[in-house]
């Protein structure tokens, strides 16, 4: 655990659908109609009520986020955030990924959700280099904590060992000395 201002930041290796937090974030796509990877896992674990709500919302632009309940999962809500498809690193990917994290936290605050779990958005099918994505994710979260001072716990839930090791190195570095 890392303590940043009053917010606890955790890195966890595992499956985000199992997290007992107020809200888990999904790495969704623009349609919000489900997909592979973490998106598929969330819809399978949460059940059909999530897809029903997503259909009513009707989609989400890249860099933004929308909220549904969490169905059968232990969390209360799911924030569906849309990260960018990585193209060449010069197509606005960094700010779109940053916004996906930042807007998720804004939405969490709006709904008074104090404990949040994130996956490594865009680092699967969307091909964002994992090191760079982790830099952006940790920066966006810490910037939000600096400005908004509301969230009590942020859990970065990494499915793969390599992503876990990357986050650990970045956070150890940010917090040393
Ligand atoms: P994207 O399309 O945004 O790249 P993916 O779901 O393909 O989304 O991958 C995002 C990240 O989520 C990847 O690092 C992948 O390993 C991870 N992931 C896949 N399943 C889960 C899960 N059940 N819990 C947490 N992370 C997961």
Image: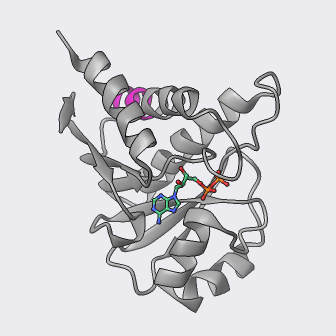
Visible residue check, residue 6: no
Q: How far from the left and from the top, in percent, is residue 27?
A: 59, 57
Identify the residue at image location x=41%, y=32%: 166
Q: How many marks?
A: 0
Q: Is residue 147 left or right of residue 79?
A: left
Q: Is residue 26 left or right of residue 108?
A: right
| Quadrant of the displayed image that contains ligand 1 | bottom right
Location of residue 40 (image quadrant): bottom right
Q: How far from the left and from the top, in percent, is residue 86?
A: 75, 37
Identify the residue at image location x=77%, y=28%: 92
Is residue 25 a member of the stretch shown in magenta? no
Is residue 143 a member of the stretch shown in magenta? yes
Q: In the rendered image, which quarter contains the N terminus?
A: top left
Q: How far from the left and from the top, in percent, is residue 12?
A: 29, 50
Identify the residue at image location x=81%, y=27%: 88
Q: What span is in magenta?
A: 141-147
Residue furthest to the front in view is: 161
Identify the residue at image location x=60%, y=44%: 123
Residue furthest to the top in view is: 177
In the depicted view, which residue is nearer to us: 20 or 114?
A: 20
Q: How far from the left and from the top, in percent, is residue 81?
A: 61, 54
Visible residue check, residue 79: yes
Q: Is residue 10 left or right of residue 140?
A: left
Q: In the rendered image, which quarter contains the C terminus?
A: top left
| Rendering colour mode | one colour
Q: Is residue 106 above or below residue 67?
A: above
In the depicted view, which residue is nearer to us: 93 or 140?
A: 93
């Amino acid at each position: 655990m890392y303590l940043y201002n009053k917010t606890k930041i955790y890195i966890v290796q595992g499956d985000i659908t199992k997290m007992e937090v107020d809200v888990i974030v999904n790495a969704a796509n623009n349609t919000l109609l489900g997909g592979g990877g973490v998106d598929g896992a969330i819809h399978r674990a949460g059940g059909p009520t999530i897809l029903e709500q997503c259909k009513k919302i009707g989609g989400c632009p890249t860099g933004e986020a929308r909220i549904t309940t969490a169905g059968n999962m232990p969390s209360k809500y799911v924030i569906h955030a849309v990260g960018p498809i990585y193209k060449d690193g010069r197509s606005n990917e960094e700010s779109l990924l940053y916004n996906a994290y930042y807007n998720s936290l804004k939405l969490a605050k709006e709904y008074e959700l104090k404990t949040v779990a994130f996956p490594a958005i865009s680092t699967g099918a969307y091909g964002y280099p994992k090191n760079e994505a982790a830099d952006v994710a940790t920066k966006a979260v810490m910037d939000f904590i600096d400005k908004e001072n509301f969230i009590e716990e942020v859990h970065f839930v990494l499915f793969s060992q390599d992503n876990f090791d990357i986050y650990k190195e970045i956070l150890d570095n940010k917090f040393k000395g």
